[in-house]
Amino acid sequence: MVRSFFFLVFALATIGSVAHAAVVDYTFEVANLTISRLCKSKVVPAVNGTLPGPTIQVNDGDTLKVHVINKSPYNMTIHWHGVFQLLSGWADGPEMITQCPIPPGKRYTYQFNITGQEGTLWWHAHSSTHRATVYGALVIRPRGGPKAYPFPKPFKEVPILLGEWWIADVMDVHNEAFLKGGAPNISDAYTINGKPGDLYNCSSTEIYKLEVEQGKTYMLRIINAALGNQLFFKVAGHSFTVVAVDASYTKPYKTDVVVIAPGQTVDALMVADAPPARYYMAAQAFISTAPPPPPRPPFDNTTTTGIVQYKSTKPTSPHVTTTMPSFFDSGIVDGFNTNLTSLIRPGDPTVPLQVDERMFIIYGFGIAACQPGQVLCNQTQGSLAACMNNVSFQSPTTMSLLEAHFKGVNGIYTSDFPVKPPMTFDFTNASVNSVAALQPLMFTARATKLKKLKYNSTVELVLQNTAILGVENHPMHLHGYNFFVLARGYGNYNATTAVNRYNLVDPVVRNTVGVPAGGWAVIRFTANNPGVWILHCHLDAHLSIGLAMAFQVQNGPTPETTLPPPPPGYPSC
Ligand SMILES: *[C@@H]1O[C@H](CO)[C@@H](O)[C@H](O)[C@H]1NC(C)=O
Ligand SMILES: *[C@@H]1O[C@H](CO)[C@@H](O)[C@H](O)[C@H]1NC(C)=O
Ligand SMILES: *[C@@H]1O[C@H](CO)[C@@H](O)[C@H](O)[C@H]1NC(C)=O
Ligand SMILES: *[C@@H]1O[C@H](CO)[C@@H](O)[C@H](O)[C@H]1NC(C)=O
Ligand SMILES: *[C@@H]1O[C@H](CO)[C@@H](O)[C@H](O)[C@H]1NC(C)=O
Ligand SMILES: *[C@@H]1O[C@H](CO)[C@@H](O)[C@H](O)[C@H]1NC(C)=O
Ligand SMILES: *[C@@H]1O[C@H](CO)[C@@H](O)[C@H](O)[C@H]1NC(C)=O
Ligand SMILES: *[C@@H]1O[C@H](CO)[C@@H](O)[C@H](O)[C@H]1NC(C)=O
Ligand SMILES: *[C@@H]1O[C@H](CO)[C@@H](O)[C@H](O)[C@H]1NC(C)=O
Ligand SMILES: *[C@@H]1O[C@H](CO)[C@@H](O)[C@H](O)[C@H]1NC(C)=O
Ligand SMILES: *[C@@H]1O[C@H](CO)[C@@H](O)[C@H](O)[C@H]1NC(C)=O
Ligand SMILES: *[C@@H]1O[C@H](CO)[C@@H](O)[C@H](O)[C@H]1NC(C)=O
């Protein structure tokens, strides 16, 4: 990493204050890595030969340049998950949304400013299913460094990346699902910082260890990088104080279980105040239920472990175990999510009270026609798909959406994404799958439809799960923005009763919301960043079958509110 410093005097900042802004350079080489886990060796794409990849460290206000050299055999892009990309949408990363991929043997420099963000974010591949092994932490410290945290400076900060592992090649798993038009095989393990831990066969040495000193405070920067599961995370004998989620500060919240959906981050302070010993840390799936319990697809029900070891303790002493919550303990999930509130500091954005655009989006599974290439797909039955307001998102193939939007090229997408469902029905009632008259609800069609938003408009989205072909918890991730999570609930959203539950004062601010299975969530944001921004389910298997849509946010009236042209070296198809 190279840090070249220069100094900027912000005319608008408090008189006399000088902010330090740096240009921070990283080089990421994506290449084959031969790696053994669970006693089986395989070749995966990885950054700089490590799993997880390098941690990026920046301060708010810095300019980050990441030179990505693609020596892997795959098309590749990298997404800087949660970074606003203010006026730099070209660097956001999702394949065919904001760029064509970087082909094998080529390179691309992602350059963008970090503006008004502090906390834990992360980076990951955003093409095909490569994020299974191409991921790492992105840590943003305040302009004034750690002393400017709104809590006492912790003794150490430790990234904890929760991942997911398949013994098979993940491309084979992904391709097999595509060919059949069905769901992919579930994973074999979860990992903590790339290691499965000692509860799996043949894995006792592959365990992450964190050494701690008695009495010191550690900030765990927890990231759920798993592809398909929300997780519970615990450390035996210790509790946490959550101070931030998705790089937004929260009011300190005490808990002994962290609840984290794929795409989300949680910054949790942990005091090493237990008797010196070795303690398990562990993560395990939660499969949130909506009453009554729906039939559930299979899921990876294994537990990944790590060790928190006090300095004076012998490495051979036994470790203190912890009991994980039940896979179905939605009470813990709801408690965590409803009790978290944001820490509002002077100058922080507040909830827009006037709404310009209201959208009601139902989403979940459906059945679409088999596509060319899906050679094992049952032509009579069709292919498993996912959709939002009955549109199953289809990526373009010849030009990215952002490039087509910028250049005004026709025929790549249409701007008619529906703002409400084509029809109203009992969305979360599982009987939709058995009532013959409702069977047509299952059929959906693929298209590339965007929703146009005026610059600076305020947008409210009601995200409503459906029970079509099964009820699941979907973590919805919006690129380019943070949003306020006003409310969440079970069953069908009812505007009359739901508004009473809106938190308009200090709702949690996130980039990924875990919408309850068989339920809904309401989010608001201000569309003050021109470009094309995808909103999608962060379960990889759902994104790849169409659980996505995109916003096309228009330029504002001034050069400072206008998307600049693509940067040099921008990959085209
Ligand atoms: C990654 O590897 C490249 C090539 O060896 C090297 O130049 C770069 O410094 C490494 N980056 C990090 C963050 O370690
Ligand atoms: C990388 O791995 C893939 C899959 O195993 C293999 O086909 C390819 O030849 C390898 N490339 C290099 C440069 O080793
Ligand atoms: C990024 O920051 C640099 C240095 O402050 C500034 O010159 C540049 O205009 C910024 N870029 C964008 C897209 O805002
Ligand atoms: C998926 O699981 C099935 C059943 O266990 C197995 O036969 C198949 O080989 C697996 N596919 C891959 C790509 O590992
Ligand atoms: C672990 O190995 C044992 C013995 O080979 C086998 O019976 C068991 O099913 C394996 N467990 C898992 C989770 O693979
Ligand atoms: C995990 O799932 C397998 C297969 O369904 C089952 O045999 C096993 O008992 C489950 N384990 C736990 C801890 O639930
Ligand atoms: C969290 O919120 C729930 C209500 O949703 C409440 O019953 C509970 O006491 C709160 N506190 C904790 C620590 O969960
Ligand atoms: C294809 O789907 C139809 C309708 O569900 C079913 O009747 C048929 O058996 C399936 N064919 C195969 C080859 O699985
Ligand atoms: C969704 O679209 C499909 C195909 O266009 C149609 O058959 C189906 O009735 C629609 N579903 C709903 C709920 O409107
Ligand atoms: C955007 O909206 C905010 C809040 O309504 C307002 O203060 C600001 O001036 C607007 N910016 C532009 C460029 O219209
Ligand atoms: C919404 O709730 C109100 C108040 O309980 C009720 O009168 C109304 O029928 C509900 N609407 C729907 C569509 O269920
Ligand atoms: C890689 O991307 C190019 C477009 O940039 C595309 O033509 C090609 O089919 C892609 N290759 C694969 C294997 O997806």
Image (cartoon, grey):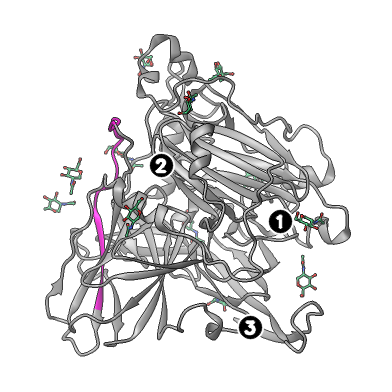
Magenta highlight range:
292-308
In this view, the residue in front, 377 or 560, is: 560
In the image, which is nearer the foreground, mark 2 or mark 3?
Answer: 2
In what element is the residue under mark 3?
strand
Residue type pointed to by label 3: Val
Q: Earlier in the sequence, mark 2 or mark 1?
A: 1
User: In this orientation, does residue 396 appear?
Assistant: no
Q: Which residue is mark 3?
A: 2
Query: Residue at point 73% right, 87% down?
Result: 18
How dense is the environment of label 2, judged by Cα within 10 Å: few (below 14), some, or many (20 and up)?
Answer: many
Query: Any mark on residue 131, and which?
Result: none
In the image, which is nearer the foreground, mark 3 or mark 1?
Answer: 1
Q: Quadrant of residue 158?
A: bottom left
**Extreme residue in the top direction:** 437
In what element is the residue under mark 2?
loop
Residue type pointed to by label 1: Gly
Query: Residue at point 39% right, 34% down?
Result: 518
3D distance between C-alphas at marks 2 and 1: 30 Å
In the visual, does 27 lie left or right of 557?
left
Assign the magenta stretch its main secondary structure: loop
Query: Any mark on residue 89, and which?
Result: 1
Q: Earlier in the sequence, mark 3 or mark 1?
A: 3
In the visual, does 330 lie left or right of 538?
left
The quadrant of the rendered image in which ligand 7 is seen is bottom left
3D distance between C-alphas at marks 3 and 1: 24 Å
Q: Quadrant of residue 324?
A: bottom left
- Check if residue 303 falls in the magenta segment: yes
Q: Earlier in the sequence, mark 2 or mark 3?
A: 3
Quarter of the figure with the N terminus: bottom right
In this view, the residue in front, 118 or 495, is: 495
User: In this orientation, does residue 270 appear?
Assistant: yes
